[in-house]
Amino acid sequence: MATSKNNAGDVGAFEFELTDFDTARQALEELPAGIAEVQRLKPGYWEARRRAAEPTDRALSGVALDWLSKLPSTVRPSRLAERFPRVANQIALNWASGMRCAETFDDLLVDHRGGRHGFPYDVEVELRGLKEYRQVLR
């Protein structure tokens, strides 16, 4: 019978924690801390997970141009459109759907994967302003 105290005379005795098989199995299946980070640093990791490049990634789509022209000048994201047309296209596609648009802004402004650099400050300010404007439209 094991005890929680290690007696000086018990050679080779060790403390242990009582657990069930499911908890033990789960502990074995989880990656140790830091392993996932190392995998993300390997060459080709993110490239294999990104969608294939499309022509609209480098230029504004017609939908995005229409959307931009309808926005008030105070919230029009000119820096975003110039520097990140793919992102502007994505927002324009989801603008009419309140839930999808909110999810899009969440994906853009919150680092769910860890280690992302985010947008330049001026672009982030535009994104946050757009998000607030879209919430007012609901």
Image (cartoon, rainbow, N blue to C red):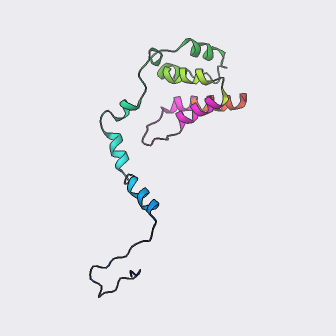
Instruction: Please name the residue shown 33% across and 77% down the image.
Output: 14
Rendering coords of residue 93 (x, y %) = 59, 21
Horizontal arrangement in the rendering, residue 54 relative to residue 80 (left or right): left
Position of the N terminus by quadrant: bottom left
Rendering coords of residue 51 (x, y %) = 43, 26
Using the image, determine if residue 99 lies above or below residue 113.
Answer: above
Instruction: Please name the residue shown 49% across and 21% down the image.
Output: 86
Corner quadrant of residue 5: bottom left
> Depth check: 52 or 85 in front?
52
Corner quadrant of residue 52: top left
Magenta stretch, main secondary structure, is helix
Rendering coords of residue 76 (x, y %) = 61, 21
Rendering coords of residue 96 (x, y %) = 66, 23
Name the outermost residue toward the top: 62
Name the outermost residue toward the left: 11
Residue 81 drawn in magenta: no
Instruction: Please name the residue shown 46% across and 59% down the image.
Output: 22
Residue 120 drawn in magenta: yes
Horizontal arrangement in the rendering, residue 86 relative to residue 69 (left or right): left
Q: How many marks?
A: 0
Position of the C terminus by quadrant: top right
> Depth check: 17 or 137 in front?
17
Q: Which residues are magenta?
A: 99-126
